[in-house]
Image (cartoon, coloured by chain):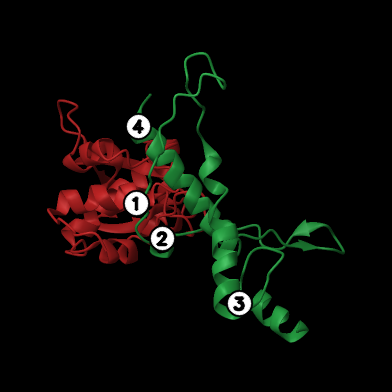
């Protein structure tokens, strides 16, 4: 079947199999390998991308039924290669160790702030609980998200 | 030395320790020897919502006996403390002395029934 995907501001016309998953279309057809396949079950959040600004798990999304514009980690960087502010905040707060979950964490963070769900550390922990990090960089990620959201928290 | 990376390593280790104490378990089906919880919905690891604020305090030391330039390696060492600390806290609160991990609710009920 023929489908046109709008990804990071560009249209891509592809012939896909009805069974093709958005994650595999991104990685294997469009070479956008910044989006990671973690568990492939919707349990880890590594494959998080934005669809019309909403975070979705691309490993559970059929390409055939994908409607919105997709934004991946590749689309966050500016045209001159400058880091997105959230990416810079992650660097500043050392919010990663191995980095495998980081693309999903950053897209989830961007959406979390945009949704207005980054008003406190407890809020961020709850609204980003679905992005697992085996290196356990959670406290630094929370700090980066709160920094971006402009929240200064007193010690709990 | 990069202090922020050292801090991140210790945070990671401590959260592993919390996971070890409270969640993490590999279950085997004895008849086949296969894992029965080989996915992230059943083999639980700490999520962000499980982890409160974490403080890291280093005690700096120039240890020339350990290494000529006085440094020490650092990595997953933070994993050592949390499980005994949590198990001791449970003992203090309930009088139950647990000898195995994780300290899940069903493990605690089993221990209570054995008393």
Q: Could you tell me if the residues under marks 4 and 3 are in contact, i.e. CB atoms within 8 Å?
A: no
Residues tagged 1 and 2 counted as in contact (Cβ below 8 A)? yes
Q: Residue furthest left?
A: A150
Q: Is residue B45 left or right of residue B113?
A: left
Determine the image quadrant of residue B39. Answer: bottom right
The disc numbered 1 marks a residue on which chain?
A
Residue B112 is left or right of residue A103, and the answer is: right
Residue, disc 3:
B105
Q: In terms of sequence position, does the residue under pointer 4 or pointer 3 come before the other?
A: 4
Residue to which mark 1 is pinned: A139
Please tell me if label 1 and label 3 are on a single chain: no
Q: Which mark is residue B51?
A: 2
**Rendered colour, chain B:** green
How far is the residue under mark 1 from the one under mark 3? 26 Å
Tell me the quadrant of the picture where the C terminus of chain B can be found.
bottom right
Residue A136 lies, in percent from the top left, at 44, 48
Say which of A91 and B109 sits in front: B109
* Circle 2 residues within 10 Å: few <14, some 14–19, many ≥20: some
Of the 4 image quadrants, the one containing the N terminus of chain B is: top left
In whole angstroms, how far apart are the C-alphas of marks 1 and 4? 16 Å
Q: Is disc 2 on the same chain as disc 1?
A: no
Q: Mark 2 and mark 4: span between their CA atoms? A: 22 Å
Q: Position of residue B87 (x, y in %)?
A: 60, 65
Q: Is residue B56 visible?
A: yes
Residue count near mark 1 (Cα–Cα under 10 Å), binned few <14, some 14–19, many ≥20: many
Chain letter, colour red: A
Mark on residue B3?
A: 4
Q: Are marks 1 and 4 on the same chain?
A: no
Q: Are marks 1 and 4 in contact (CB under 8 Å)?
A: no
Q: Report whether A82 appears left or right of A1.
A: left
């Amino acid at each position: 079947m023929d489908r046109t995907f709008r990804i990071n501001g560009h249209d891509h016309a592809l012939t896909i199999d009805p069974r093709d998953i958005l994650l595999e279309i991104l990685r294997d057809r469009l070479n956008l390998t910044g989006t990671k396949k973690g568990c492939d079950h919707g349990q880890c959040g590594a494959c998080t991308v934005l669809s019309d600004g909403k975070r979705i798990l691309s490993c559970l999304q059929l390409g055939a039924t994908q409607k919105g514009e997709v934004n991946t980690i590749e689309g966050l960087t500016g045209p001159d290669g400058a880091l997105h502010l959230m990416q810079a905040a992650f660097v500043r707060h050392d919010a990663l160790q191995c980095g495998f979950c980081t693309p999903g964490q950053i897209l989830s963070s961007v959406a979390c702030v945009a949704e207005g769900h980054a008003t406190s550390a407890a809020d961020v922990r709850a609204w980003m609980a679905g992005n697992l990090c085996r290196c356990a960089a959670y406290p630094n990620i929370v700090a980066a998200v709160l920094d971006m959201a402009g929240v200064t928290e007193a010690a709990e | 030395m990069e202090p922020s990376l050292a801090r991140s390593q210790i945070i990671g280790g401590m959260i592993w320790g919390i996971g070890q104490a409270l969640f993490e378990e590999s279950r085997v089906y004895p008849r086949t020897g296969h894992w029965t919880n080989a996915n992230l919905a059943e083999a639980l690891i700490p999520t962000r919502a499980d982890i409160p604020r974490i403080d890291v305090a280093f005690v700096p030391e120039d240890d020339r006996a350990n290494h000529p330039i006085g440094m020490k390696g650092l990595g997953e060492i933070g994993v050592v403390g949390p499980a005994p600390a949590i198990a001791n806290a449970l003992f203090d609160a309930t009088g139950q002395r647990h000898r195995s991990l994780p300290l899940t609710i069903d493990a605690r009920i089993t221990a209570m029934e054995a008393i």
